[in-house]
Structure formats: structure tokens, C-alpha cells
Amino acid sequence: MRSLIDIKELSVKEIDSLIETALDIIDNPQKYSEKCKGKKLATLFFEPSTRTRLSFEAAMYELGGNVLGFSEAQSSSSAKGESVADTARMISCYADIIAMRHPKEGAPLVASMNASIPVVNAGDGGHNHPTQTLADLLTIKRKKGRFNNLTVGLCGDLKFGRTVHSLINALNRYEGIKFVLISPEELRVPSYVKNEITKAGKEYIETKDLVSAMPELDILYMTRVQKERFFNEEDYLRLKDSYILDPAKLTNAKADLSIMHPLPRVNEISVKVDTDPRAHYFEQALNGKYMRMALILMLLGIK
Amino acid sequence: MKIEEIKNGIVIDHITAGKGEELYKLLGLDKLEIPVAIMKNMNSAKMGKKDIIKIDGAVELNTDIIGYIDPCATVNIIKDGKTVNKYGVSLPRELKNVISCKNPRCITSCEQELDQIFKLTDEEAHEYRCLYCETKAK
């Protein structure tokens, strides 16, 4: 019995195999429409997350399975003080696989240590969100056709952005990857993540300037610079526009650049960019569903 | 300054100067009712200065804690006034219920019956991280 708590638990070979399954699902959806018949996915969402929950639910329905669960802690027994461990044991009696989101970091790991069915981490606080990374990887594969020899720009809040850290960890394993870390000084990638890049023998550069970094990028992964991350409003106001992507900033970008964003977007990508053929963030959300389908099949041992 | 030799007990020697008190507390030696001495800044030919802890009586020590605080320390078991066993300690791969995670967003902050587990993540830097949230131990 296998769970997925952290993207690092998947080998390169397993990621390749998940991608292969996802691509086959895209090409032959009918072949998969009854693969999970009679199986139930429990979506245990201790904090609201409409998109991730709906993506998991859509994934299970498209595999012919069923879904049960809750979408906020108030409607679960945790409101009565039940521990994560007990919830996981109890749900193991009713479902075949769990997707869990929890505001506390490590909660899905605790669930996986106590459940007798696979647990998928659907986001634990600011810590891990492996299925977002799977969505990112499928998007890169579909748009660039490869994971090696890419210059990957990561822009915005690189300090607190869990999706950024997970994506770095995943791409660190491929040859010829170069990271361009674009952020205000206050929101730089933490040193332990940079150490991981160095340990993996990969290159990175840090810059505050999105426009001058643009021409060399194969991928631009945008994240939101949130006001509450700044110590004072003055700094926020000074910096916020530098990290808003608009058509003007794309003037010197490569013709085959792939613009990605884990969503939800607020204002960090102008809506004027949406019609640019290089904008791939909505497809990225769709890719998330396909990868969740592939992951559910893998964890349930269904071929 | 002289502290009497012990007949039956344990001497933790070669503790890096300044770490004796922390080790004393983490080992829970403050809760013992037998004589315990912490000797600080003692002269050492090898180390310049060192701390020593002497425990006058047989007790079970968690050597993981000693290894975590100071992998240079040595443990001497004394019986009838003689050293019958002497061994070094090393950085443990895992620490269970020795230190607590200080991250307020960690699941251990609200579910206190969970074991506090830390994994050795960087041997060179003596770095431990919480099993659950991966926050670095302070």
C-alpha cells in the first residue's frame, strides 16, 4: 500500500510512467471510464479548496468511481476534536483512497501512517502539494516535450510558495536544468531549497528583474506576490507591479515560451495575456485532473 | 576544585565546553535523586576546555540524546571504581520525543499525542528536520 505525501517520493521512472498513463487517458478517455468502478475516493478537505477538490472528484468520476467526503473542517468530526489519525482509520473502513487537504503541515503524513488505504496529500499548509507538481510536470511535457535542457524562470513569491519548492525538487533530477529565480529580495527562495539545487549540480541565478530575465526563459512559472508577506505597505506598493506579467513584459520572450501559474490568479498575470498562445495556465489545471487520474490508478494498483 | 571519584555510575566525558548544561537538562538528569555533578570548562589536553557530567549511580541513558547534543562526547561506565566500558556516540539518524517542533503550523502543535520525530537531514551541518513539516530543529 502506497501513499503520496511529497513529490520526492516518486522516482523519475514513476513520474514518467504517470505521464505516460495521463497521455494515454487524454488520447483514449473511454478506455479508462470504468477502471475505478466500485471504488470510492474520500476527499477530506479540512480547509476549503474548490479547485483541487473538484479536480480530484472529476478525476475519480471520469474513472467510473464514486466520491464521498467533506469540504470544510466544520462539517467533519475534527470539529468535535477527533484526531487526524482516528479520522484516517475510520475513513479506511468506507473508502478505497483518500485525498486530504489540511491547514496543518504534516497532517496527510499522519493520516498515511494510520490509514489502511492510500493517502494523497492534496496540500498541507505551506508545505507540500505534490499533485500540483504533477500537473506542472505534465504541462511541461506536453508543451516542451522534455524535462531536460530547460531554463525555468520562477517569479513572484519564491519564499513561501510551496508549488515553487516542489517544482524545483522535481526538476532538480533532470539534466541541463537552469533556474532563474525572479523575486523581490524579501521573497527569495529559502537557502535550504537553493542548497538542494546546488547539491543536484544544477545552476541558478537570482534576479529582481523579470524583464531582463525574460529572453532566455523556456518556461515562466508565475506566482502571486501577496501583500501580507511584506513588512510594510510602502515596500509592497513599490514592488507589486514589477511582478505583474503583461503583454509589454513579454516583448522579448521566446516564441515558444510556456507561461504557467498554479492558480488561482489574482492580478499577477494581466487578463490580456490570456489570449497569448504561450499562456498555458488553464491547460495546466486540466492537466492536473489527468495526472490525478493516473495517480489514483497507480495507488490503487489498477492497470 | 575536586569532585570525588564515583564507585558505580556513569561519566560523560569530552563534552564540548558549554554543552554540559543542555545535555544535563535534555537527559532529564535534573529529575534524578542521586548525586549528579556538572563540571564546566575543565582543562583538557585534547580539547583545551571541556565539560564533564558525573552520575553517581546506575541509570539508563538515552545515548541518542548525547549523540544529538555532542557526538564528540564519550560515555564511561564505572563499576567498583573502575571503568568497565567506554564508548563514543554518534549523531542519531532519528530523534524521538527528545525535542519539539516549534513550527506553529505543524500538525504536532495541535495534536499533542503525536510522537515528536526528527530526522537527520544533513550530517555535516548536524541538521535535523521535523518528520511532519520538515522544519529545521532549533
Image (spheres, rainbow, N blue to C red):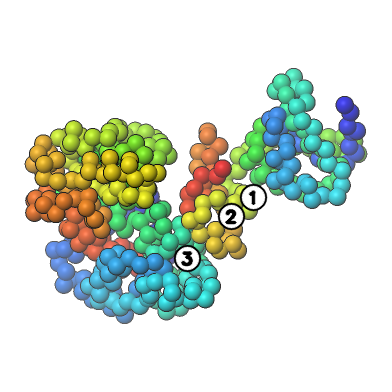
Q: CA distance from mark 3 to mark 1?
A: 23 Å
Q: Residues within 10 Å of mark 2 (few under 14, many from 20)?
A: some
Q: Nearer the viewer, residue A193 or A290?
A: A193
Please determine whether, in this image, residue B77 is positioned above or below residue A71.
above
x and y percentages locating residue A14 in the rendered image: 31, 54
The image quarter in which residue A196 lies: top left
Q: Residues within 10 Å of mark 1 (few under 14, many from 20)?
A: some
x and y percentages locating residue A291 in the rendered image: 26, 60
Labels 1 and 2: the sequence-earlier one: 1
Residue B116 has which mark?
2
x and y percentages locating residue A303 in the rendered image: 28, 66
| Residue matched to label 3 | A111
Q: Residue B36: tell me if it is visible.
A: yes
Q: Nearer the viewer, residue A280 or B9?
A: A280
Q: Are marks 3 and 1 in contact (CB under 8 Å)?
A: no
Identify the amino acid type marked 3: Ala
What chain does mark 1 sit on? Answer: B
Q: Are marks 1 and 2 in contact (CB under 8 Å)?
A: yes
Identify the amino acid type marked 1: Val
Q: Nearer the viewer, residue A267 or B68?
A: A267
Q: Residues within 10 Å of mark 3 (few under 14, many from 20)?
A: many
Point 51% across, 51% down: residue: B103
Identify the amino acid type marked 2: Gln
Q: Secondary structure at mark 1?
A: loop
Point 30% across, 47% down: residue: A225
Please determine whether, in this image, residue B34 is positioned above or below residue A72.
above
Instruction: Assign the N terminus of chain A to one quadrant of the image.
Output: bottom left
Q: Secondary structure at mark 3?
A: helix
